[in-house]
Image (cartoon, rainbow, N blue to C red):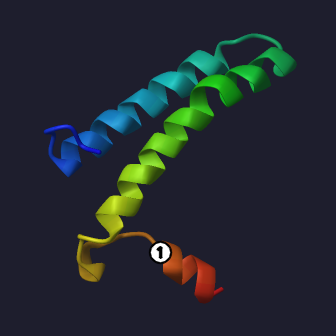
Protein backbone atom coordinates (compact mmCIF):
# COMPACT_ATOMS: atom_id res chain seq x y z
CA UNK A 1 0.00 0.00 0.00
CA UNK A 2 2.80 2.42 0.83
CA UNK A 3 5.23 1.51 -1.98
CA UNK A 4 8.42 2.13 -0.01
CA UNK A 5 7.22 5.38 1.54
CA UNK A 6 6.70 5.84 5.22
CA UNK A 7 3.08 5.77 6.31
CA UNK A 8 3.41 9.38 7.43
CA UNK A 9 4.68 10.49 4.02
CA UNK A 10 1.99 8.43 2.29
CA UNK A 11 -0.83 10.20 4.10
CA UNK A 12 0.81 13.62 3.64
CA UNK A 13 1.03 12.96 -0.11
CA UNK A 14 -2.56 11.69 -0.23
CA UNK A 15 -3.83 14.78 1.61
CA UNK A 16 -1.94 17.05 -0.79
CA UNK A 17 -3.55 15.22 -3.73
CA UNK A 18 -6.95 15.61 -2.06
CA UNK A 19 -6.42 19.34 -1.61
CA UNK A 20 -5.37 19.68 -5.27
CA UNK A 21 -8.43 17.69 -6.38
CA UNK A 22 -10.70 19.90 -4.28
CA UNK A 23 -9.21 23.05 -5.78
CA UNK A 24 -9.62 21.65 -9.30
CA UNK A 25 -13.23 20.63 -8.67
CA UNK A 26 -14.06 23.96 -7.00
CA UNK A 27 -12.95 25.79 -10.12
CA UNK A 28 -15.06 23.62 -12.43
CA UNK A 29 -17.72 26.25 -13.09
CA UNK A 30 -21.45 25.86 -12.69
CA UNK A 31 -22.89 23.74 -9.90
CA UNK A 32 -23.78 20.70 -11.99
CA UNK A 33 -20.35 20.58 -13.62
CA UNK A 34 -18.72 21.21 -10.25
CA UNK A 35 -20.65 18.31 -8.70
CA UNK A 36 -19.40 16.00 -11.45
CA UNK A 37 -15.84 17.21 -10.89
CA UNK A 38 -16.10 16.49 -7.16
CA UNK A 39 -17.30 12.98 -7.97
CA UNK A 40 -14.54 12.43 -10.51
CA UNK A 41 -11.59 13.97 -8.66
CA UNK A 42 -12.35 14.49 -4.97
CA UNK A 43 -14.16 11.28 -4.09
CA UNK A 44 -11.31 8.99 -5.27
CA UNK A 45 -8.77 11.18 -3.45
CA UNK A 46 -10.86 10.96 -0.27
CA UNK A 47 -10.94 7.18 -0.60
CA UNK A 48 -7.14 7.10 -0.89
CA UNK A 49 -6.75 9.18 2.30
CA UNK A 50 -9.22 6.94 4.09
CA UNK A 51 -7.35 3.73 3.16
CA UNK A 52 -4.13 5.10 4.59
CA UNK A 53 -5.84 6.52 7.69
CA UNK A 54 -7.56 3.17 8.31
CA UNK A 55 -4.17 1.46 8.20
CA UNK A 56 -2.56 4.04 10.49
CA UNK A 57 -5.41 3.69 12.96
CA UNK A 58 -4.26 0.14 13.67
CA UNK A 59 -0.65 1.08 14.48
CA UNK A 60 -0.90 4.48 16.19
CA UNK A 61 -1.51 4.37 19.92
CA UNK A 62 -4.92 5.56 21.10
CA UNK A 63 -3.22 8.26 23.16
CA UNK A 64 -1.82 9.77 19.95
CA UNK A 65 -4.83 9.24 17.65
CA UNK A 66 -6.59 12.63 17.63
CA UNK A 67 -9.89 11.53 16.08
CA UNK A 68 -12.46 8.85 16.90
CA UNK A 69 -11.58 5.44 15.52
CA UNK A 70 -13.89 3.70 13.10
CA UNK A 71 -14.98 1.30 15.84
CA UNK A 72 -15.73 4.19 18.21
CA UNK A 73 -17.89 5.90 15.60
CA UNK A 74 -19.66 2.68 14.74
CA UNK A 75 -20.37 1.32 18.22
CA UNK A 76 -20.29 4.30 20.60
CA UNK A 77 -22.79 6.65 19.00
- State the residue at coordinates (30%, 34%): 13
Which residue occupies the foreground of this view, 2 or 60? 2
Identify the residue under disc 1: 68
Q: Tag 1: Cα neighbours inside 10 Å, few (<14), some, or many (≥20)?
A: few
Marks counted in the figure total: 1
Residue 5 found in image quarter? top left
Q: Quadrant of residue 17?
A: top left
Indicate the position of residue 28 as horizontal and vertical percent values: 70, 12
Query: Left or right: where does residue 51 sit relative to residue 38?
Result: left
Q: Tell whether 32 sits left or right of 61.
A: right
Quick one: 52 or 3, which is closer to the camera? Answer: 3
- Give SS at disc 1: loop
Q: Determine whether, in the image, residue 4 is placed left or right of residue 36.
A: left
Residue 52 point in image, percent of width and height: 36, 51
Query: What quarter of the picture does the N terminus occupy?
Result: top left
Q: Residue furthest right?
A: 32
Q: Is residue 57 above or below residue 74?
A: above
Extreme residue in the bottom direction: 76
Residue at image coords 52%, 82%: 72
* x and y, in percent, of residue 68 in the image: 47, 74
Q: Quadrant of the C terminus?
A: bottom right
Determine whether, in the image, residue 19 is placed left or right of residue 7.
right
Q: Residue at x 43, y 51 (%)?
A: 51
Residue 53 higher or lower than 22, as above or below: below
Residue 71 on image: x %, y %: 51, 80
In the rendered image, the vertical position of residue 5 relative to residue 16, given as above or below? below
Amino acid sequence: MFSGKSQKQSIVDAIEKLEAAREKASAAGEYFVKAGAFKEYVLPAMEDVRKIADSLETVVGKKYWPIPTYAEMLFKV
